[in-house]
Image (tube, rainbow, N blue to C red):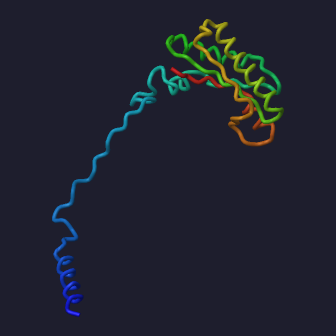
Amino acid sequence: MVAPIALIAAGSLALGACKTTPDELPPEPTPTPVATSTSTPGGPVPGSQADFIASVASDTVYFDTDRFNIDSADMATLQSQAQWLMQYANKRITIEGHCDERGTREYNLALGEKRANAAKNYLVSLGIAASRISTVSYGKERPVAMGSDESSWAQNRRAVTVTIQ
């Protein structure tokens, strides 16, 4: 019976000897600067995707239902993209073709490819080397607008230009 009491007393003494608050607290941590590749204090890094988006009329051209033709609004958008691409001759791009949710998967993949290629061909006609442009079709797999109405469908019928290098 003495042993348990002695153990409790020894434990209490040991815990009592522990200091719970230090005499002096450590200094507050200083924030570590984080390097970013898309912006600088003066704006986006020249030649980056952020610079592309900030510099061109739009990174996206839109299409009518079941169409892949480049209209006058698309021409203006692609002309501004071509100007940026001429300024950054080492940059490569991918043009992503997209469709709305209507139609079969196969039909929309084919239509998305036609849309991406239509945008590519127009850029090539403006003097951008075809070797700098790749295309991909996502069909209806990557909508930007969720909904089954004309407004959503119109936003999803598009070709988006993305810088890759």
Residue 25 in percent (x, y) is at 21, 60
Residue 116 in percent (x, y) is at 70, 20
In this rendering, position of residue 63 left or right of residue 53: right
In this rendering, position of residue 143 left or right of residue 25: right
**Residue 18 falls in which quadrant of the image?**
bottom left
Q: Please state, as top left, top right, bottom left or bottom right, where the N terminus lies in the image.
A: bottom left
107 and 54: which is toward the camera: 107
Residue lying at the far bottom of the rendered structure? 1
Please give the name of the residue rendered at 70% of the width and 29% of the height, measured from the top-left corner: 138
Say above or below: 13 vs 94. Answer: below
**Residue 27 falls in which quadrant of the image?**
bottom left
Say above or below: 34 vs 112. Answer: below
Residue 135 in percent (x, y) is at 65, 20
In this rendering, position of residue 6 left or right of residue 87: left
Say above or below: 27 vs 34. Answer: below
Please give the name of the residue rendered at 78% of the width and 28% of the height, measured from the top-left corner: 108
150 and 112: which is toward the camera: 112
132 and 58: which is toward the camera: 132
Residue 121 in percent (x, y) is at 69, 11
Please give the name of the residue rendered at 61% of the width and 21% of the height, measured from the top-left corner: 94
In this rendering, position of residue 59 left or right of residue 15: right
